[in-house]
Image (cartoon, grey):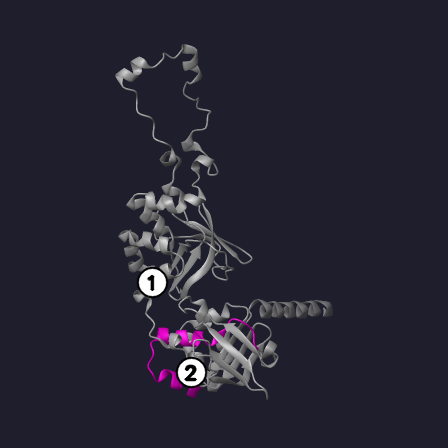
Amino acid sequence: MMGQRQHLVLLIFSLVLLFQTSNAHNITLLIAKHPSLSKFNHYLTLTHLAPEINRRTTITVLALENDAMSSLLAKNPSMYTVKNILSLHVLLDYFGARKLHQISNGTALAATMFQATGVAPGNSGFVNITDFKGGKVGFGAEDNGGNLDSFFVKSVEELPYNISVIQINKALPSAVAEAPAPGPNELNITDIMSAHGCKVFADTLLANPEAMGTYEENVNGGLTVFCPLDDPLYQSMSMLRSNNGLMNTLATDGASNYDFTVQNEGEDVTLKTRISTVKITGTLLDEGPVAIYTINKVLMPKELFKASALSPAPAPAPGPEEAADSPKVSKSKSKSKAAPTADADSPADSPDNDPDDQVADDENAGTILGADRFAAAAVLSCLFVFFLL
């Protein structure tokens, strides 16, 4: 009996340990212990930043006490602007109290969640951290002239080396983060794409009003867009890692075609159709309910590229004069060129990996641009994915 109890205790302990290691943190529960940060905590929930913070494994939150939040909200910013401001206060690295006083050369530059949204141009999404003599630590947005406007107050919560919550005395000033931010239905998707290396795709989208109209009809409900870079360059990704499996697109109909499969391996996120495999290479925009990712080539649906459609057209029959001038074919030679038997493979029966059924990767963009409007619109629609919050 004693042995069974010991076994049960060890099992419970193991489950608790597993839970603690698999669920890294819950930012709202951590801050809820501190009433002086209740307003900051409330807006992490309202802006949907809390779940974005929770899904990251290494993070530092620069928390603001209630008076500092009241000063920030006194200008009546929109909820989207508040999200940008608070995103600037979430560092994509771990800085506990001890590490703040051990910064190499006394200063460090940290990327933020605002920088990760893709709407922060230049260095506006970075925060400078400087350790002064006497234990004082200053923080400043890089787009604010290098001024260190805010200072470390205390460590609130630390779970090394996953999350650290640090209180600073006031919000970090940033003209870019504080600028009026558009809502989802006000976003100019093609301008965002063109400005971040997806101009060919954006121009193709603009040339197909059917696909563009589909986007406009669905953007408020939540949308994810994959756009091929004009000149692909691989970057590691941390998005879409929990979405393995079949995914529908705006081109999907009741027959379940025009789908693709998401596969994850380490840092790589791969999208697959039956004739093409592409990698997600970066993030242009990641701000609910809209996300836009770059991919290294066009995602091609098999439904638009049947083998018969790719076969060359038959040569025209010779005219009477050409037939008279052409040499007669012997019976033996004619027999050698007889129609293939039923056992022979035909293009229509080719397997999925048959070369005749493939579309060359380097010709993907040209294929879309050369296709008819319906085909191009269908390909573009396949790159739009519902992403409901």
First reached walking from the N terminus: tag 1 or tag 2 = 2
The amino acid marked with disc number 2 is Lys
What SS does tag 2 mark?
Answer: helix
Residue 326 in sight here:
yes
What SS does tag 1 mark?
Answer: helix
Q: Residue at 30% across / 15% down in the picture?
A: 323
User: In front here: 87 or 160?
Assistant: 87
Q: Is residue 365 magenta?
A: no
Residue marked by disc 2: 39
Residues under numbered marks 1 and 2 in contact, where contact means CB atoms less than 8 Å apart: no
Q: Residue at 40% across / 32% down in the picture?
A: 348
Left or right side of 158 for 49: left
Q: Position of residue 326 (x, y in %)?
A: 34, 15
**Image quarter (top left, top right, bottom left or bottom right) of the C terminus:** bottom left
User: In front here: 384 or 93?
Assistant: 93
Q: Position of residue 373 (x, y in %)?
A: 29, 46
Q: Is residue 92 magenta?
A: yes
Choose top left, top right, bottom left or bottom right for residue 329: top left
Query: How far apart, in angstroms, are the residues tagged by discs 1 and 2?
Result: 28 Å
Q: Residue at 59% across / 73% down in the picture?
A: 161
Q: Position of residue 225 (x, y in %)?
A: 38, 57
Q: Residue at 45% across / 75% down in the picture?
A: 88
Q: Which mark is residue 221?
A: 1
Residue 275 in sight here:
no
The amino acid marked with disc number 1 is Gly
Q: Compared to 1, does 134 lie above or below?
A: below
Left or right side of 347 for 317: left
How many numbered markers are drawn? 2
Q: Position of residue 39 (x, y in %)?
A: 42, 83
**Magenta part of the chain:** 66-95
